[in-house]
């Protein structure tokens, strides 16, 4: 379980958000939504301590990750798989090696075991035929899927998706949403999805946290969001529907 | 204030690199790749730099020292001493600030703005150990080797230029070179190259590692790394000469 308590972050004089608190239970998919530039990705990077807050705590299974020393933080991060906005694939190596990368450094697996695990991860994302492709040959959707394969190869407890459907056509975005649902169901993973794509939220999320004007403006179940009378949230949802 | 802030971040990065230099298993593979990129891949440009430096120096010295009272071996002595004590190290390092420094800053800058460094950290890697330590170590280890290449080809270029221009016979050139050869000058050249290798690679790593702002940011970090690397090499050259000679 992830507990976010009273988190505050600013860059210099610019306050990103403050007083952010919510919980993510095991097996849930939490969507963090809000307008561009409201600090969704910044919040995501606090959940595995890639960034440090000005104040507040993130508790993972009861332990405050900001009190961990550097080695413990690195061990904690291995519980997380992360899909970055631009996929963040290593462009000096091919698809297979990108997925194999964490296995080579963090496990003592033999070459045959690495191959099996990589191919299994690529099969999950329907890219078993793209193993030998260079990353420069992959389309946007394929890059996202390779990013997901790399994120799950160490069998993490949590996956964080940063704008998983941004820049994709609607059909490919739907495939990614299906993939996120399939990851949650098949691998029993807790997921955190940062997005401003309301279609994606409705497809994948159990709960929603809405960031607005430097604070956590609303949080609750997706079903409650649909019937909420929260003005800013309604305005945000309507703007998204209008775009559709 | 801005410069103090930059100095603080640079020192902090070096401290992290020093602390993580014990994690050999993390950067072993990258170190061997960097040794090849910094050392082996730079040999052709350093050979050319050495040959032309020695050749031009010989022709200019012969032009300036045209006198019946100055033996021709003096030209060999001046050229070889200048190459060993100054030119092989400084000119090579200025060239390497462009070749190695720009590459390192661009690689790390691109990795930063495309979130590849965040991806490494989020997997549990120590990105400083993985990316910075092998590049700086490769600079420290390979620059002295490139100094040998630059010196040998510089003197060879001088001999060739003297011979083909008909102004200095090889025997006279080499006699002068041997007569005024001091081993300390070579040791001084090695010390300089170790310092220059450290400066160029660490500054480039710093500029690339903290790059921000997309393609323009990477371009700026590359330019800054090259310019700052060159300036610091010249400054360090002066300080080392003042301290050690």
Image: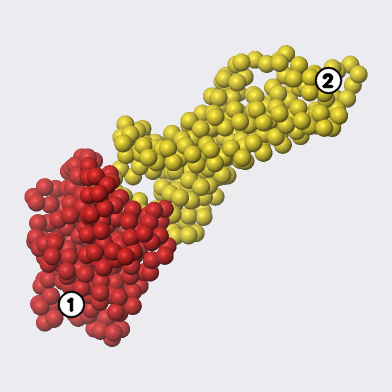
Pick the front one: B171 or B132 = B171
Q: Residue at x 48, y 30 (%)?
A: B141
- Secondary structure under badge 1? helix
Toward the viewer: B138 or A222? B138
Answer with left or right where residue B47 lies relative to residue B69: left
Where residue A70 sits, quadrant-wise, is top left
Visible in this render: residue A26? yes
Give the color of chain A as drawn: red
Label 2 Cα neighbours within 10 Å, binned few <14 / some 14-19 / many ≥20: many
For this view, does B134 lie left or right of residue A225?
right
A35 vs B237: above or below: below
- Residue A228, given in percent of the width and then of the height, sits at 12, 79
For the colour yellow, the matching chain is B
Q: Which residue is mark 1?
A: A202
Disc 1 is attached to a residue of which chain?
A: A
| Residue A193 image-quadrant placement | bottom left
For this view, does A89 lie left or right of residue B197?
left
- Residue B67 drawn above or below residue A187: above
Q: Residue at x 28, y 75 (%)?
A: A173
């Amino acid at each position: 379980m992830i507990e976010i308590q009273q988190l505050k972050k600013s860059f210099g004089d610019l306050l990103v958000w403050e007083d952010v608190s919510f919980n993510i239970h095991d097996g849930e998919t939490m969507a963090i939504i809000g307008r561009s530039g409201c600090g969704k990705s910044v919040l995501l990077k606090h959940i595995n301590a890639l960034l440090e807050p000005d104040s507040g705590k993130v508790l993972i299974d009861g332990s405050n990750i900001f009190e961990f020393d550097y080695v413990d933080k690195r061990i904690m991060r291995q519980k997380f798989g992360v899909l970055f906005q631009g996929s963040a694939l290593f462009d000096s190596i091919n698809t297979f090696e990108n997925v194999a990368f964490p296995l080579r450094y963090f496990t003592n697996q033999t070459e045959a075991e690495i191959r099996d695990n990589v191919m299994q991860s690529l099969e999950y994302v329907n890219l078993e035929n793209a193993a030998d492709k260079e990353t420069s040959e992959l389309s946007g959707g394929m890059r996202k899927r390779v990013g997901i394969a790399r994120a799950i190869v160490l069998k993490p407890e949590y996956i964080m998706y940063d704008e998983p459907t941004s820049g994709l056509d609607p059909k490919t975005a739907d495939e990614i949403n299906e993939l996120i649902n399939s990851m949650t169901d098949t691998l029993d993973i807790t997921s955190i999805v940062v997005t401003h794509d309301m279609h994606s939220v409705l497809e994948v999320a159990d709960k929603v946290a809405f960031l607005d004007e430097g604070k956590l403006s609303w949080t609750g179940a997706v079903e409650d969001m649909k019937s909420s009378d929260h003005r800013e949230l309604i305005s945000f949802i309507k703007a998204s529907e209008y775009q559709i | 204030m801005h410069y103090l802030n930059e100095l603080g971040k640079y020192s902090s990065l070096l401290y992290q690199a020093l602390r993580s230099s014990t994690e050999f298993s993390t950067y072993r593979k990258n170190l061997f790749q960097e040794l090849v990129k910094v050392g082996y891949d730079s040999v052709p440009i350093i050979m050319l730099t050495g040959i032309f430096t020695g050749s031009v120096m010989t022709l200019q010295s012969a032009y300036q020292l045209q006198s019946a009272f100055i033996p021709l071996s003096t030209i060999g002595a001046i050229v070889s001493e200048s190459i060993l004590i100054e030119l092989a190290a400084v000119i090579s390092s200025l060239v390497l600030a462009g070749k190695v420094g720009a590459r390192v800053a661009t690689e790390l800058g691109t990795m930063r703005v495309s979130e590849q460094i965040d991806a490494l950290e989020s997997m549990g890697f120590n990105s400083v150990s993985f990316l910075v330590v092998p590049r700086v170590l490769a600079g420290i280890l390979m620059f002295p080797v490139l100094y040998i290449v630059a010196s040998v080809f510089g003197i060879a270029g001088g001999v060739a230029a003297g011979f083909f221009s008909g102004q200095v016979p090889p025997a006279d050139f080499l006699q002068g070179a041997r007569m005024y050869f001091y081993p300390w000058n070579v040791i001084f050249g090695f010390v300089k190259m170790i310092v220059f290798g450290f400066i160029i690679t660490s500054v480039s790593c710093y500029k690339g590692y903290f790059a921000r702002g997309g393609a323009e940011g990477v371009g700026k970090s590359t330019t800054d790394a090259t310019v700052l690397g060159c300036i610091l090499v010249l400054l360090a050259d002066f300080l080392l000469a003042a301290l050690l000679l």
